[in-house]
Amino acid sequence: MPDPVLSPTDAMILLVPVLPIAIWAALSDLKRMKIPNTSVLAMAAVWPLLGWYVSPTLTVWAWGFALMAIVFVAGFLLYLTGTFGAGDAKFAAAMAGIFVGGDIGEILLIIFVCMIGSLVIHRLLRSLPVVRNATPDWESWTKKRYFPFGLALSAMVIFYLLAAIWPQG
């Protein structure tokens, strides 16, 4: 198995700014079913500002930008079909650079677990009166057809970085 692109130290360096931004995006999506553009811009700034430092080469860093562009185009196409929200597409593109060079199997597993886990947790919390009473103005509780995918996206990037930090021995 090849060495991971992100060392535990590199992942921790990225996690420090990513964690509050991801929490902000997830909570905003839960409350208003919108991911603020300012959180997208903040997440998009992480890769240009820190990616060069944590990447093993400048080529890997540049591929991070390419991955961001690819995810943006894919997200835009999904938005056009009504499959994905615009904020979700932008946020996914903003965080995509962090995944460059990662193990595709690990990334797909994290994506799968976070998508299903976020849906189950959201639906469970939505059904609890104590949670609904504490957050009565959250739009995601009443939108039956839609799901705040920012919750899943935020979980993906957080768990990916935590997996890189976790001891592999």
Image (tube, rainbow, N blue to C red):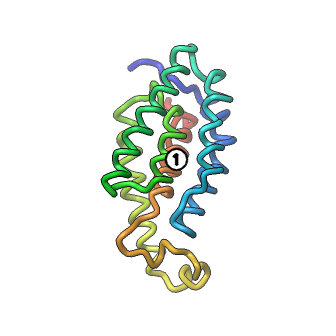
Above or below for 148 versus 88: below
**Which amino acid type is shown beneath numbered disc 1?**
Phe
Q: Residue at x 61, y 42 (%)?
A: 43
Q: Position of residue 162 (x, y in %)?
A: 55, 41
Q: Is residue 107 above or below residue 21?
A: above
The picture places residue 149, in percent across and down from the top left corner, at 45, 58
Tag 1, which secondary structure? helix
Q: Quadrant of residue 8?
A: top right
- Closer to the camera, 128 or 138? 138
Residue at left offset 53%, top offset 40%: 95
Q: Residue at x 44, y 39 (%)?
A: 72
Q: In the image, is residue 56 above or below residue 107?
A: above
Viewer-proximal residue among 91 and 101: 91
Q: Residues within 10 Å of mark 1 (few under 14, many from 20)?
A: many
Q: Residue at x 52, y 27 (%)?
A: 65
Whether residue 49 sits left or right of residue 108 in the image: it is right
Question: Seen from this angle, which residue lies furthest front?
Answer: 80
